[in-house]
Image (cartoon, rainbow, N blue to C red):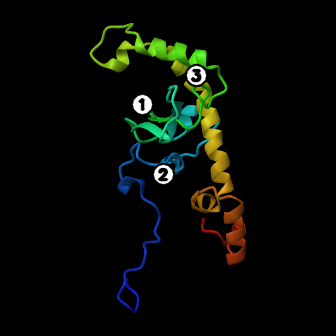
Amino acid sequence: MADDARQSLPDLGKFDPGQAEALDDTFDFFELLRRLEQRGGLFGYSGRADREPARLGQHVRLSFSAKDVVEFRQAKDETPGKDGTPARVTVANLGLMGPEGPMPLHLTRWVLDRLSQRWFTGADARQTVDTTFVDFVNILQHRMIALYYRAWADAHPAVQVERAVGGRVRAMLEAMAGTGLPGTQNP
C-alpha cells in the first residue's frame, strides 16, 4: 500500500528469520547478538549455553582491538538446541584474558604460546593448535558475556519492545494502548 504521496509505507509485519540478511563479523557486538536473538532464543535467560542462539567466547590477544566482533561462524543447524554445531561469536571487547581482562598478562602470554605451537598433525590450522585452555575459559566466559549483553538489552527500550517476552517498556505500551490485560490479547 502507499500513502497519498504514493510513497510506500514501511513494512510493519513480523520479522521472518528465513529472509534475514547474512550475518558476519562486520556487525557491532550488540547488533549481532540482537539479530541472533531475533532468529530464536534469548541470551542470558535459558541457564544453559546449548539453549542460547550462539556460543560466545573471547579472542585471546595482547593488543587492544579495533572492533568488537572478531569472528562469527554460522550454525550448521539453524535451530538452537538441535544436533549440530551452534553459531559461534568470538569477541574482543570483553573477557578474562588480554589487556582489559582481570587475569595477569603472563597467563595470556602462556595461552598465546600454546596457541602458536603445533601439537597435532592436520591439514587445518585450527586442528593443529592446542586450544584446550581457551575452550575451558570460553565455557566460563560464555555466561559472563551473555549476561553483559542481557544487562544492555534490558536497559534499552527498543530491544525490550521487539522481544516476544516483552519487558517493562512493552508492558507500559500495551497498558497505554488498552491491550495489556490477558483478556485483550490474542490467544
Question: Label 2 neighbourhood size at 10 Å, few (<14), some (14-19), many (20+)?
Answer: some
Amino acid carrying label 2: it is Arg
- Residue 103 visible (yes or no): yes
Badge 3 is on which residue? 137
In the image, is residue 15 above or below residue 118?
Answer: below
Question: Label 1 neighbourhood size at 10 Å, few (<14), some (14-19), many (20+)?
Answer: some
Badge 1 is on which residue? 85
- Farthest residue in the front direction? 63
In the image, is residue 12 above or below residue 105?
Answer: below
Residue at 69% of width from left, 64% of height from top?
Answer: 169
Badge 2 is on which residue? 35
Query: Residue 116 appears at what percent x and percent y?
Result: 41, 14
Which of the image's four quarters has the C terminus? bottom right
Amino acid carrying label 3: it is Val
Query: Residue 133 appears at what percent x and percent y?
Result: 54, 16
Helix, strand or loop at mark 1: loop
In three-dimensional space, the C-alpha distance between marks 1 and 3, rounded to whole angstroms, equals 19 Å
